[in-house]
Amino acid sequence: MDRKFDAQLADLAQTHPALGLLRLAALLAEAEAEPDDDALDLLFEQVDAGFLLDVAPAEIWPELARGLMARSPAKMIRTLRDCGALAQVLPEAEALFGVPQLADEPAPVDLGAHLLDSLHEAALCAAPLPVRVALLLMNVGKADSPREHLPLHYRHIERGLPRIDAICARLGAPQDCRELALAAAAEHERVHRASKARAGPIALMLERLGGFDAPQRFRELMTVCACDYRAYGERSGQNYPKAELLETALAACAEIDGGGFAGTNGEDELREARALAIARVFGSQRWSG
């Protein structure tokens, strides 16, 4: 460990043991070196002593956010899991490890390992905190999918959305993190399938994703989907084609003036105009009103 890290480690002696445990995991995520035996032993001792049982969930959030924004957020999650802390701090994420997820490759991937890989991709592209929180939480509805259906996860969105709400409320996560995590859980698989949609559904998808009225949320959601995509197989660092497709569709709608569609049918007419613009740019008239 470097001197700066050693000094930070020494400061933990002045911190509540449970928060010190989480702070240490976050600091390890920032350090270039892997945790040494002394650091790991300290984590194990604090978990075994039950310190995490006495800490208020809202006090956990600043340390969790610190680790998620570190150089290697996946290292923080891995470290917390290795010492048994993740099951106490975020059991919904712990439950993803060992659960298979269908992938393009012949063999399914482990959702827990995929979570770590997607956080690694988020760090590589310097993604903001809401993106990293969304990647951490968006698959929690898949943790208890019926075993007979695996590696498919039917109705995981219905299970996942209330869990994400509960996690964010418990930890006191910021509203932008909560909103993006909910949007990612509901939409990221639809975004991955966007090339199969017709122009009308794509126009409606852009509306749901905030493309027309919440551009920052749209961009962050595209980053979430890109990191999720790059976490599969050998895609690390690759361009995400579905984001490019949706950005092309959004640009095609840019010159349509929403204020020009008024009256009883104005909203439907606006959506129809957007669908036609997207159909033209895609070189196809396959659209639905």
Image (tube, rainbow, N blue to C red):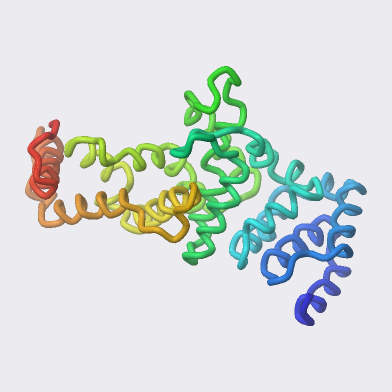
For the C terminus, which image quadrant?
top left
Is 201 displayed left or right of 156 in the figure?
A: left
Q: How many marks?
A: 0
- Toward the top, the furthest residue is 148
Where's residue 185, x and y in %? 46, 39
In the figure, 57 relative to 107: above or below? below
- Toward the bottom, the furthest residue is 3
Is 70 displayed left or right of 198 in the figure?
A: right
Where's residue 40, x and y in %? 84, 59
In the figure, 123 relative to 80: above or below? below
Q: Nearer the viewer, residue 66 or 241?
A: 241
- Toward the front, the furthest residue is 106
Where's residue 17, x and y in %? 86, 58
Quadrant in the rendering for residue 219: bottom left
Q: Residue at x 68, y 52 (%)?
A: 77
Q: Residue at x 61, y 59 (%)?
A: 68
Q: Residue at x 7, y 37 (%)?
A: 285
In the figure, 192 relative to 119: above or below? above
Q: Nearer the viewer, residue 64 or 107?
A: 107
Q: Residue at x 23, y 40 (%)?
A: 202
Is 36 displayed left or right of 172 in the figure?
A: right
Where's residue 71, x and y in %? 61, 67
For the N terminus, which image quadrant?
bottom right
